[in-house]
Amino acid sequence: MDTFDPRAAATTARPSLYGKSAVVTGSTSGIGLGIAKALAAAGANVMLNGLGAADAVEATRSELASAFKVKVGYDGADMTKPDAIRNLVERAERELGAVDILVNNAGIQHVAPVESFPEAKWDAILAINLSAAFHAIKAVLPGMKARGFGRIVNIASAHGLIASPFKAAYVSAKHGIVGLTKVVALETAESGITVNAICPGYVWTPLVEQQIEDQAKSHNLPRERVVREVLLAKQPNKRFTTVEEIGALTVFLATNAAASITGAALPVEGGWTAQ
Ligand code: NAD
């Protein structure tokens, strides 16, 4: 019998998601892009989605494909449009062969007191942060059920578990997606499909970096104090979550090792909701 050589096994082992295909909504920047990179690094083919200049999106697409030797496509579906979401899923099934992993990540924010909250912003936040996930889930489930395997990861927020003032639409949509996660998890529990929500606190993205600079200027405070006392006031560990941490958790949820985790809302927020 040949002796087992762990070094040889390590160099020839396939990445954990080899042969799987994923759709990540809102993956042209921030957390979605971090998740798309982590999935591609784990061997999954990826369909990118999101807004952005055509040349920048194409640069991201080709960079991921060549760095990780996986198929990477792009579909610019507007997450406010149910038909476009259905077409995105059909295209991913056609071009990548299947949708084994769906990550509902696209999201927007607007901050205002409820009496002056613009109706159009309420509608857009509910459409992109909540209804888009319903339409995408509805479109991927028949294929996942037929194959007996599926992983759905909804990017909610600490605001899916608790509230802050002035974020009526965002908090409503994020609580809604946690509820949707639980319902679909129950409906698919015997089908080899898991459905989970990730609930990040503040994640360090270019958007947050801009907020640090703006707040530092407007409060005339050094950057470190803005981070500790303004942005991370409620986050006990006083550090930003990173897109790599959210990507790594998404990859883990997509593996066979996470087969029994379903219907969960997983906080990744340095203890914010433990208080
Ligand atoms: P981001 O603005 O960097 O990325 C949002 C993505 O959604 C982009 O790719 C954008 O193009 C896309 N998008 C926006 N509107 C769209 C539309 N109509 N159609 C298609 N795509 C659209 O933001 P982010 O910080 O990376 O946020 C990603 C997700 O993570 C959101 O759901 C957000 O609520 C959630 N989240 C973010 C944080 C944070 O601190 N950054 C914390 C908790 C939860």
Image: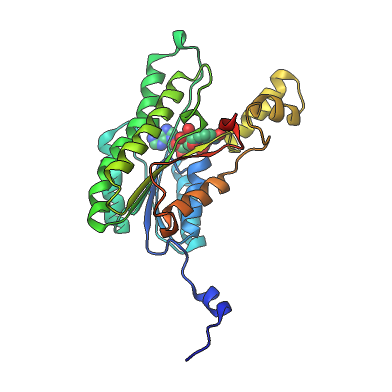
> Relative to residue 198, is residue 190 depicted above or below?
below
Q: Nearer the viewer, residue 105 or 9?
A: 9
Q: Position of residue 171 (x, y in %)?
A: 46, 24
Q: Position of residue 41 (x, y in %)?
A: 50, 59
Q: Residue at x 42, y 64 (%)?
A: 18
Outermost residue on the bottom side: it is: 1
Q: Position of residue 79 (x, y in %)?
A: 35, 34
The image quadrant of residue 256 is: bottom left
Q: Residue at x 67, y 36 (%)?
A: 237
Q: Position of residue 255 (x, y in %)?
A: 43, 57
Quarter of the image containing the C terminus? top right
Count of marks overlaid on the render: 0
The image quadrant of residue 131 is: top left
Outermost residue on the top side: it is: 115
User: Do we see residue 88 in this rendering?
Assistant: yes
The image quadrant of residue 51 is: top left
Which colouring convention does the figure follow? rainbow
> Relative to residue 112, is residue 189 depicted above or below?
below
Q: In the image, is 1 to the left or to the right of 95?
A: right
Q: Residue at x 71, y 29 (%)?
A: 228
> Relative to residue 145, is residue 172 depicted above or below?
above
Q: Nearer the viewer, residue 164 or 131?
A: 164
Q: In the image, is 128 to the left or to the right of 273?
A: left
User: Do we see residue 52 in this rendering?
Assistant: no
Q: Residue at x 50, y 26 (%)?
A: 162
